[in-house]
Image: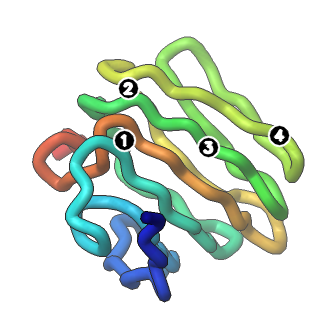
Amino acid sequence: MPNLIAKPTVITAAGNKPKLIEEFVGRVNSGTSQVSVARMKSPAGWVEPGQTPLFDEYTVVLAGCLRVETKAGSLDVEAGQAVHTPKGEWVRYSSPHEGGAEYVAVCVPAFSPDTVRRDA
């Protein structure tokens, strides 16, 4: 039988400005360790610390533009586009443009503070 997830849990975000994270599926909201699904809303000028996560991250941008920096360069992912960041690759996310970004992030296995491995 399907399980209704009535609402997300709001989680505190890392970065230089407040960013909204609403976890629908994951370790916090549903007790799921295999995958996490969260909607993010980041303001213009937001940037988070770099990280080398132990999970794959699939991101679908719903509105605005999300910048994805890696050691090989950077991508601007626009509304209607998606990006996959493989586990073990250094990455830093930001929303440098006016209007910020709204996006859905899917992490496999689920995001956790212990496996995100943020830069010091």
How packed mark 3 is, by other alpha carbons closer than 10 Å (few <14, some 14-19, many 20 or more), is: many
- Determine contact: label 2, label 1, CB under 8 Å: yes
Q: Quadrant of residue 34?
A: top left
Say left or right for 117 vs 60.
left
**C-alpha span from label 2 to label 1:** 7 Å
Considering the numbered disc 3 on the image, is that residue within a helix, a strand or a loop?
A: strand
**Residue at 61%, 71% in the rendered image:** 42
- Looking at the image, is mark 2 or mark 4 nearer the viewer? 4
Image quadrant in which the N terminus is located: bottom left
Considering the numbered disc 2 on the image, is that residue within a helix, a strand or a loop?
A: loop
- Determine contact: label 2, label 4, CB under 8 Å: no
How packed mark 2 is, by other alpha carbons closer than 10 Å (few <14, some 14-19, many 20 or more), is: some
Q: Where residue 73 sits in the image (x, y, percent)?
A: 62, 19
Label 4 sits on residue: 81
**C-alpha span from label 4 to label 1:** 22 Å
How packed mark 4 is, by other alpha carbons closer than 10 Å (few <14, some 14-19, many 20 or more), is: some
Label 2 sits on residue: 90
**C-alpha span from label 1 to label 3:** 16 Å
**C-alpha span from label 2 to label 4:** 21 Å
